[in-house]
Image (cartoon, coloured by chain):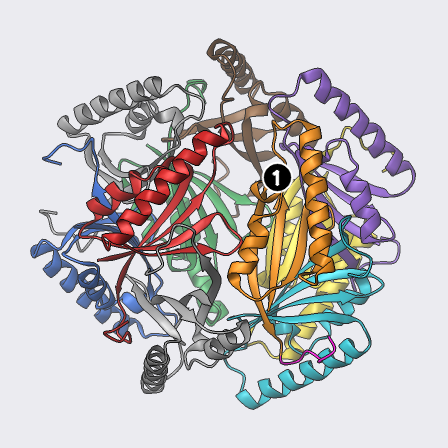
Chain colours: A red, C blue, E green, F brown, G yellow, H purple, I cyan, J orange
Amino acid sequence: MLYHVRMDVHPPVHMPAAEFDALKLAEREMAQALQRRGVWVHLWRIAGQYSNISVFDVGSHDELHDILSGLPLFPFMAVAVMPLARHPSALDVA
Amino acid sequence: MLYHVRMDVHPPVHMPAAEFDALKLAEREMAQALQRRGVWVHLWRIAGQYSNISVFDVGSHDELHDILSGLPLFPFMAVAVMPLARHPSALDVA
Amino acid sequence: MLYHVRMDVHPPVHMPAAEFDALKLAEREMAQALQRRGVWVHLWRIAGQYSNISVFDVGSHDELHDILSGLPLFPFMAVAVMPLARHPSALDVA
Amino acid sequence: MLYHVRMDVHPPVHMPAAEFDALKLAEREMAQALQRRGVWVHLWRIAGQYSNISVFDVGSHDELHDILSGLPLFPFMAVAVMPLARHPSALDVA
Amino acid sequence: MLYHVRMDVHPPVHMPAAEFDALKLAEREMAQALQRRGVWVHLWRIAGQYSNISVFDVGSHDELHDILSGLPLFPFMAVAVMPLARHPSALDVA
Amino acid sequence: MLYHVRMDVHPPVHMPAAEFDALKLAEREMAQALQRRGVWVHLWRIAGQYSNISVFDVGSHDELHDILSGLPLFPFMAVAVMPLARHPSALDVA
Amino acid sequence: MLYHVRMDVHPPVHMPAAEFDALKLAEREMAQALQRRGVWVHLWRIAGQYSNISVFDVGSHDELHDILSGLPLFPFMAVAVMPLARHPSALDVA
Amino acid sequence: MLYHVRMDVHPPVHMPAAEFDALKLAEREMAQALQRRGVWVHLWRIAGQYSNISVFDVGSHDELHDILSGLPLFPFMAVAVMPLARHPSALDVA
Amino acid sequence: MLYHVRMDVHPPVHMPAAEFDALKLAEREMAQALQRRGVWVHLWRIAGQYSNISVFDVGSHDELHDILSGLPLFPFMAVAVMPLARHPSALDVA
Amino acid sequence: MLYHVRMDVHPPVHMPAAEFDALKLAEREMAQALQRRGVWVHLWRIAGQYSNISVFDVGSHDELHDILSGLPLFPFMAVAVMPLARHPSALDVA
């Protein structure tokens, strides 16, 4: 099942840059691993913002929550989730 | 270039059902033609709402506006557009 | 899987009362049938408002959307959906 | 009487992790004790957020306020309360 | 128990004035009867608006909802309810 | 004249607990003195929130502002004021 | 006492133009009479909007409400009222 | 030309009180000088809030911005500006 | 002086198409005349919306209001105005 | 292609003034270089606010995002982007 997720990152004010950079690197590695597994199926940057629009394909709400809350940047993100259903006008190949 | 578009449909109160059904049919045909051309690359229903999340791939803002404002249901939709940039953690295949 | 759904009903201004009453009766019958099937697991009225808070237990986003969009009052409701995950502090019996 | 309560947790920025973990543990114990007493009747995680949707069954507004304001994480939560009435279409067993 | 209720009246556009006046008269009579019974304990006009701030003293959420949804102007009001608890600094006589 | 006042308290993050407790105690004493004088005529807690709904009876806007801005917790509160007029359906005894 | 009032006019959709023009003329006459009496002390147009910012000088909330709710355009206006107190940096002549 | 300006002051959390008092004193002196020059033509306190409603009479947007951004408290204020035009019902003397 | 203006058009529901087309034609002619005079210095369509972003160069708030309120589509537009000042980093030629 | 960008600057609370001044100087130099290259085509100050309205002319969303996220003040700005299309009533010279 597909979930539309928007993440807005609010970097911590007092964290040393090196520490935050390490979190970003770990986030990137996890994001890429999840993309390779076919779980994080889309990942786009909203132009001009430290935000992304993502689509996840997972089997349950619990699995989605475990993934999102386990992201290294989760404590510094506002997250909004919308479940996506099939659109009656969507082509099968879309 | 990719654009994230949300469309919320507000059916007209006073239009006869047959007339609105004809508009929906024309909308569906146009949506599918644009999907076949690779312009309307994603089309999902937001679960529980008469709304969709779409991604368009077009060459310019003008082309996007011409497509959206030419949709049969455009007069009955609230439309929100966000330009999408490449995310530094996105895999090339994504 | 559980979904938290809020429905706010906005009765149509121009519909004859008898016609809207028939819709409400059909809505009630469908709501009770879905409760008996274990799909519509909670249904509460928000005190002082023509609104309800509901919890649905269905197998997929598509199934949820089909149910909600098929409700007789759907054209007259604002609907908001949130996927619910298990809370780590919830007892198994809850 | 039933109350619908949404809690959004905003962890304190400057508190040592061990201190906040102790608060979370105490919160969990209190939440489970209240569930066993039949007071905190539902507790769900909103997928993707450090938030929960809860339903409490207490005898008065004062009792509800005492419980909520006594939660260990109360100083770090935004709380929204809605009184729930019986829905005319709800089955008795619901 | 006390409930804080705000009601914003939106008169129907197409109803004949005499019909709406009759509803207002019935509303007034019901409001005064409920005041005499000690149920509608405060009723104030928000200066400059067709709105009121009220406090009700009833035994349950269900009783509150029955009263509010039975008001003649209920179909033309936006209603917001907040349960009120005792304030620790309030004097007993307040 | 009556004023409807909502106060939402946001405790300071960095103040020592003993210092804030002293402010709360001073606030309580001032609130009770104003209640005894018939100036702070109602004081309720919004269930589940560190907020109150109050009604003040003072002779002028200036007097109201002097009282509110002189409260010990004023620097830590968001305050919203609405002037209350007599409601045409209110009984004289209300 | 001074009150800051913002009025946003929403002309009725179905009223014949001549009828609405008559209301506007009556509104103008009442506004000018109240200005001559020193009650409506300031009246400005918000540039680009069918809205005004006004300041009234009246003796009580009840008097303000009677004036505002008696304006011919009151049924077609959204009105927001803020009580104004003396500013400690204001000169006496201001 | 007249500009309607609302200023909401948010005192800095970490600044020593004496330092902020000095800023307030400087602000007051500048406000009074601008009132004497006929530039800051109205200055009112919003009752119950650390906010003011002001009207400025200056020759250009640039002059307004220079004045506002030069206020000692400007770094601690949220400022909202609306250009005011003459109202067709305003008396010349108003 | 420059003003930033956003206009969102809400076509009237019940007006015959030919009548609204005539208003749009008149609007277009007026917009182009004002552009030729150097008054309406920028006019852009917000992609995907029946809205524009405009910049006007006029001598006073009154002149701006006269122009905007005289547009044929003014009764069907939501208009938001912001005065623009010179930016300290703007080049003279910009 | 043109993009409408609004930037609201929120200076960091704890950064030494000299360090922030250096960032502002670097921002200014980059803004002027981009203006000279014809990329940052308009740059206005919103009167009374530490905010600007800008128009960029770039070849793609990616190019826009690279420019904006590379600004020295980007970590301290809220940024909102709207793609601008040609308006059918705009003159060619505009």
In front of the other: G57 or J47: J47
Residue J74 location in percent, x, y? 58, 44
When asked about the image quadrant of residue J40, the answer is bottom right
Q: Is residue A51 above or below residue G15?
A: above
Task: Tell me the residue at 86%/32% (across/down).
Answer: H32
The picture places residue E86, in percent across and down from the top left corner, at 38, 24
Residue carrying label 1: J10
- The rendered magenta stretch, by its main secondary structure, is classed as loop
Q: Is residue F32 above or below residue A17?
A: above
Side of F93 where G6 appears, left or right? right
What residue is drawn where x is 66% and y is 80%? J89
Is residue F73 toward the left or the right of residue C16 in the image? right
Most foreground residue, H65 or C76: H65
Residue G59 seen by the camera: no
- Apparent side of residue J35 relative to residue G36 in the rendered image (left or right): left
Q: I72 or F88, which lies in front?
A: I72
Q: Is residue I53 above or below residue E43?
A: below
Q: Position of residue I83 (x, y in %)?
A: 74, 56
J83 over H70 or under it: above or below: below
Quadrant of the frame with the N terminus of chain H: bottom right
Q: Write down the chain letter for disc 1.
A: J
Residues in magenta? J88-94
Residue at coordinates 52% horizontally, 62% vertically from top-left? Answer: J61
